[in-house]
Image (spheres, grey):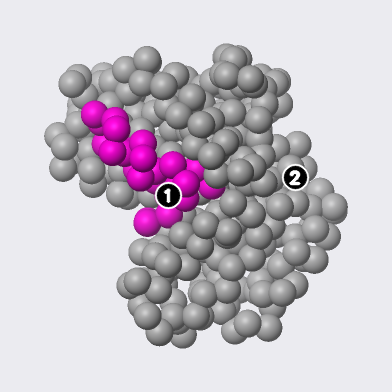
Amino acid sequence: MNNTQPIGFIDSGVGGLTVIKEAMKQLPNENMIYLGDTARCPYGPRPAEQVVAYTWEMTRFLMKQGIKMLVIACNTATAVALEEISKELPIPVIGVIASGTRAAVKATKNQQIGIIGTVGTVNSQSYEQAIKSRVASATVFSLACPKFVPLVESNQTNSPIAKKIVAETLQPLQNKKIDTLILGCTHYPLLRPIIQNVMGKDVQLVDSGAETISEVSMLLDYFSLVSLNTPEPGKLVCYTTGSTKMFDEIANTWLERTDIQSKQIQLGDA
Ligand code: DGL
């Protein structure tokens, strides 16, 4: 294994770019390949078997590009496919749920933790189980927010409609006395200022995707896979199954770049 081989990141759409942003900060020497299955986004409402099948299609595409590690930068896919994929791949595979759980358990003072995610992630109860297995006395409030991902994918994260939808959707969490809220979908950090505003400054938001990069960094060390002393910063190559125009607009704004030009690929029935 050559350490300059890229790390692969997959998501149902642009959400995993929130993980890439943190990776670019913590791991600037690493080459990275990102694949967003935008044409089939959202994964959240889909049956688990379909999400597993789509995640495998993305994984196979990136394996052909010679990745040295795979990050499933999608909570919905992590919840249903991480175990199977990590067993079968010859490279390290990392999901986003364990890191988010650890960060939330560390952050909470009153053991009242909220988790927002897609219908798939919430129904899987993955966060709930992971938190409870560490802190049995914790109370976990889970809430599916199916309207959030379409706002992000259509680049409407600052719109008045986004503010209205976020405020209405998070209403059920308002009187739960949570002091920590897990953003259990990698799309949600793009709505972070609005979410923080609605929940109030006393609620600590945990960005599972960003937390995952500390684990990626640790595992690169553990497996001696770190790309060290490269003459230039690492490169980011992006693929999408959907519109490159919309993808590039969101990617360049979010990552504060101007040079990202994604390539369109086709996967399965996408
Ligand atoms: N970004 C994804 C997640 O973290 C899923 C969004 C979706 O496709 O529903 O769960």
On whether residue 61 falls in the magenta region, the answer is no
Residue at the spot of label 2: 151
Three-letter code, disc 2: Leu
Q: Position of residue 121 (x, y in %)?
A: 55, 54
Q: Which residue position holds label 1?
A: 96
Q: Position of residue 120 (x, y in %)?
A: 59, 51
Q: Which residues are magenta?
A: 76-99
Which image quadrant for residue 225?
Answer: top left
Q: Is residue 218 left or right of residue 58?
A: left
> Who's the residue at 39% across and 43% down the image?
82
Q: Is residue 22 visible?
A: no
121 or 213: which is nearer to us? 121
Q: In the rendered image of this protein, does residue 34 appear above or below residue 113? A: above
Q: Is residue 44 above or below residue 20?
A: below
Q: Quadrant of residue 165?
A: bottom right
C-alpha gap between disc 1 and disc 2: 21 Å
**Secondary structure category for the residue under label 2:** helix
Q: Is residue 79 magenta?
A: yes
